Image (cartoon, rainbow, N blue to C red):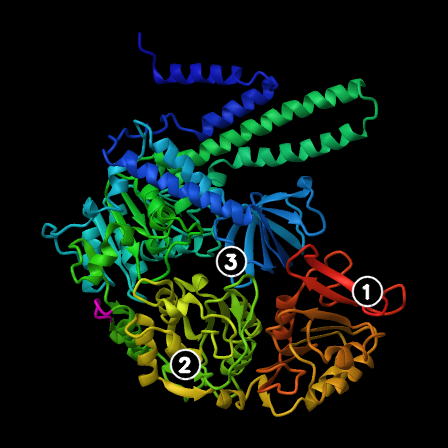
Amino acid sequence: MATTRPERREADRQVGVRRQPGLEITRRVELQKMRESLLDDENPDTPVEYPIHPSWPAIAAEVSAALRDELSTVTRQRTQQEIPLVAGELVERTPTRMIVRYEIQSSDNVREGLTATLVPAENSGVAEAVEAEVLTQFGAEITLKLPADSVFRETARLRCDLSWLVHRQIQAYAEFRADAAPGFCTEAALATISPAGLLDAVPPLDPCTVIGLNDRQASAVAHGMQPRVTWLWGPPGTGKTTTLAALLAELLDSGRTVLLAAPTNAAVDVALSALLARRPTFRNGEVARIGVTDSTALVGLSRPVVLDEIAAAAGERPARRLVEVQAELGELRGRLQAATEAKSPDRIALTRKIADLTEFQRELGTLLRDVRDQVIRKAKLVACTTHQVMLKSLYAKHFDTVIIDEASMVSSAMAMLVAGAGNGHTIIAGDFRQLSPIVQAESPGSQEWLGHSAFEKSGIAEAVRRGRPPANLIALNQQHRMRRQIGDAIGTAFYPEVNLRTASSVHTRPTRTVHTDQAQLVIVDTGGLAALVARRGGTSSRYNLANAQLAGNIVHVPLNTATNPGSVGLISPFVPQARLLQALTAGRQPAAVASTVHRFQGGETDIVLYDAVESTGSRFDPHAWFTKTHMGSEGARLLNVAMSRAREQAILLADMSYLRTICPAGTPVRRFLSHMSEYAELRSWSAVADSSGPTRREQTLTQVLEDIAAATSTIDIFTAATDGPLTREISEAIAALPDTVKVSIWYRADDPTSLRCVEDPLRHHHTMLHPLRPVYESCIVADSVVWSATGPILGSRPGTLLRTQHANLADALRRQFLRRTIGDAPGTGEHAVRCGCGSLRVREEASGGPRKGAYSVCRSCGD
């Protein structure tokens, strides 16, 4: 005889009460009541059983092999890395989380969404380590989400296991290679990477009229409503996000369930915020944003959209009880430690109570996870990062439509996993002329499946290049961001097939520039300066101090010179240079930001300054970003993304003659340089150095003696030669400094004059002497003053001298130059070690051989 629903609920209740034998009866009843009040009677969704496409097993095997190659490479290169974090700031503490912001010291390999471990700076003990999720990383600033009960620390280290995402993908492909893949549609997955997703013709579409969209955007919405694959190509500023927001609103209004995924939290938040701006009213729980957001537009809404907030509102009582149980457990454990006798009745009772509470804590956590799963199950729109799609709860949910935003940055392997969560109605949006996915392994399989997005793997990019785009590719062609001359330069160089046009609204908005007399396109040509280029953070990552000093003058806004100054973005393809540029942004109004190109994709500022870094003064081979510049190359993508962030003014800081020499003719980068040379306002580096700002050109080093004498904290000197006419005077000025001033001099190890001009005068001083091979830098940093030279700054031919009064730039340089202490060898910002004979030891480094490492050596007694 069939049972009624109340009978089934009572049976389930009785089973549930009996299911946790380790709990006291009162807690079992409390837990069951909370479960009944929070969870409905609906059974969890049964995953759809899709048939396995005949091509899937072989392709899944190829992708799995590529992922294993990537895992091996990542593990071999950096199984774990610990990144120093300083200048911590507590942003927010709630009952469910703590958000902290730090300045990141030594790595740009951190990705948003990364799960890592935060450990104290002074102690890496496991007991004090906490799990951290990277919310955002921009320039040298990183924001982390920590557990609510974490201890806030102003300094810490982030321990990163960079293989976690690859592990997840390998596991997913292993599950989906079986004879059956519940909840995963292999046909939908394959359509994103094969010609099956490219159509020669499409049926006539009903006209789509959406307020606020132009014809091409409205056409994209009409295409996106069709149950098939649609490719949306959105060049810079063409309103891809606006189009997706309109499409999402139409899909929700039609009653479809939608999965929105993007490679970063920031990209997800941008798309979701645009949707809420277009469609502000929605049912409670209709939209669920998985993960943590840093967007103020999505947090604290009357009808929450962030999954944790929805679940916390629904599960308020168990969440509160969980906090109470955690506090009680802490108290009980403290009492247990205080109990001295191992077998005393009190200690046994405390142990039993802790065991009971621990089980209750676990069950409360399970209940809250069930609440979260129910929220996801009932939501009409689920928004998350691409790696979060691999959660089992998402494959159990049926999605009518899947949208992948910023798909150019998503590997084809990951795109298949995301698209497979749907049934084949997939919209893939992005710009394959912008940044590509990041891959470490160099094997052909890894490059093919992890280094190429679905746009390349499916053949879209090649079809566009040949002038035969598929019928289901919609290319937006009216840009609303850049002034016409900037848009023309970007369109001519990187989008010749699109006929990129500038919207009329751009011409009528107020102008915002650094200086009122500057044009939309500006070149600051450093040709003839021959600035030195140095390396930090690897063989290919480099920086150019002179360029950073010139940038300080370029973005300097004198009073009454710029009546309507705009926001500024300082961009460089190289991480060390981006960190120097960021030092120039502190306290600037309007706001200025600086970072690498990768962190700027999707953003915009009124003015962009792109620092190319490369120079005729470099002793290194030019980077491939400037020598391999064909369409689709990383060099073309980087320049395109960087310069297309500009709304009002695009400034190129570069050695133009050098770039023209190393950049092949006929490539997009060369076309962009040619267009700039023809239409941009040209300014020489010398004119910039002689303009107002923190930097000025000096004819002699006489001023440096005054700067050294005035120093009260630290002095750092890098020079390849020490045979200059003022070297002895500079050494004597340093010798006269008190012990409170920490001095470090880095000079070429085989310089024949160093003993006479540097070491002898400073032998009994506290200066830290460091013979180094090689020395690429040439600079002096005395407290807040920065000097650079195009030759050895203490040599007979120092070349062009630039002096910059800028405390933040000086601090950034010290961080760049920082060498960690090894053994008894001191580092920058420390006094030298004194030998037993009374003389100071000299720090020396050996890069190879049996004595590889850093040492302190006494030149007097040889110890």
Q: Is residue 590 above or below residue 7?
A: below
Would residue 409 appear left or right of 817 to someone viewing this image?
Answer: left
**Of the pair 841 and 173, the residue shown nearer to us:** 841
Image position, residue 325 (x, y; %): 63, 32
Disc 3: which residue? 137
Element under disc 1: loop
What is the magenta segment's predominant secondary structure? Answer: loop
Which residues are the magenta region?
A: 496-500
In this rendering, the label closer to the viewer, 1 or 3: 1
Q: Quick check: is 545 in the magenta stretch? A: no
Q: Tell me, for residue 63, which label it has, or none.
A: none
Q: Is residue 650 above or below residue 104?
A: below
Q: Residue, x 62% and y 78% (percent of image)?
A: 778
**Of the pair 398 and 828, the residue shown nearer to us:** 828
Q: Residue, x 49% and y 42% (percent of image)?
A: 164
Q: Residue, x 51% and y 85% (percent of image)?
A: 529
Mark 1–mark 3 Cα distance, whole angstroms, equals: 38 Å
Q: Is residue 479 above or below residue 60?
A: below
Image position, residue 335 (x, y; %): 77, 30
User: Mark 1 near mark 3, Cβ–Cβ under 8 Å?
Assistant: no
Q: Amino acid at mark 3?
A: Gln
Which tag, 2 or 3, sits closer to the chain's start? 3
Disc 1: which residue? 833
**Quadrant (top left, top right, bottom left, bottom right) of the C terminus:** bottom right
Q: Tell me, for residue 656, which label it has, or none.
A: 2
Image position, residue 642 (x, y; %): 40, 69
The reply to whether residue 662 is in sight is: yes
The reply to whether residue 290 is in sight is: no
